[in-house]
Image (cartoon, rainbow, N blue to C red):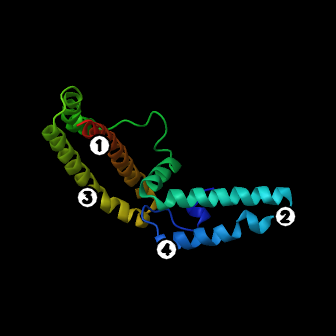
Amino acid sequence: MNYFTFYKLPETFWPDTAALKRQYYAFSREYHPDFHATSSPEQQQKILHMATLNTNAYRTLSDPDLRMAYILNSHGLLDEGKQELPADFLMEVMDLNEQLMELEFEPDAETRQRVEAEVNALAETLDAGIQPVLTGYEMLPGDARPQALQQIRTYYLKKRYLLRIRESLAKFAARS
């Protein structure tokens, strides 16, 4: 079942968090296994399934990154083999990757800080560029959503790539 449908919310990258939480708590009470201890084994199994669905839906929709991945997955945009990044972005981060390789062999706090600042600046630019798309997605007509989803997919993949660079930087910082 679609998590947005489950919570009776529109598919959006910015759900009403109060409504999300209200629905989660309402379903938590309704599907709590302790309230169905005397039910038939089949009914108990159904309640357990619904309680698990509720927990997974809330966990996913309350986290911006998980929510974004969920929406993209539900539209088949994160399928295996569709993970390519735009060439211009790869060229942009090639210098960062070269500097990371240098840091691996010659740790240098100044270089690490410079790379970290470049990654942060790139991430801020990405975030600023995607905000209008994320904010306006819910109001888009159905035929305009696929293009917006492609932009969001590209943003998501770039963000994940930058996260891997940040993880490498954290390893280098821990060594020094």
- Farthest residue to the left: give it: 110
Q: CA distance from mark 1 to mark 4?
A: 32 Å
At label 4, the amino acid type is Ala
Point out residue 119 in the picture as x, y percentages from the top left corner. Answer: 22, 45
Specify few, some or many for label 2: CA neighbours under 10 Å numbering under 14, 14-19, or 20 or more.
Answer: few
At label 1, the amino acid type is Arg
Q: CA distance from mark 2 to mark 1?
A: 50 Å
Q: What residue sits 48% from the left and 62% below the top? A: 62
Specify few, some or many for label 1: CA neighbours under 10 Å numbering under 14, 14-19, or 20 or more.
Answer: some
Mark 2–mark 1 CB contact (< 8 Å): no
Q: Which mark is residue 39?
A: 2
Quadrant of the rendering where the C terminus is positioned: top left
- Secondary element at image label 1: helix
Q: CA distance from mark 4 to mark 2?
A: 32 Å
Q: CA distance from mark 2 to mark 3?
A: 52 Å
Q: What residue sits 44% from the left and 54% below the top? A: 68
At label 3, the amino acid type is Ala
Closer to us: 110 or 152: 110
Q: CA distance from mark 3 to mark 1?
A: 19 Å
Question: Closer to the camera: disc 2 or disc 3?
Answer: 2
Quadrant of the rendering where the N terminus is positioned: bottom right
Q: What residue sits 37% from the left and 51% below the top? A: 152
Residue that mark 3 sits on: 128
Labels 4 and 3: the sequence-earlier one: 4
At label 2, the amino acid type is Ser
Question: Closer to the camera: disc 4 or disc 2?
Answer: 2
- Secondary element at image label 2: loop
- Secondary element at image label 3: helix
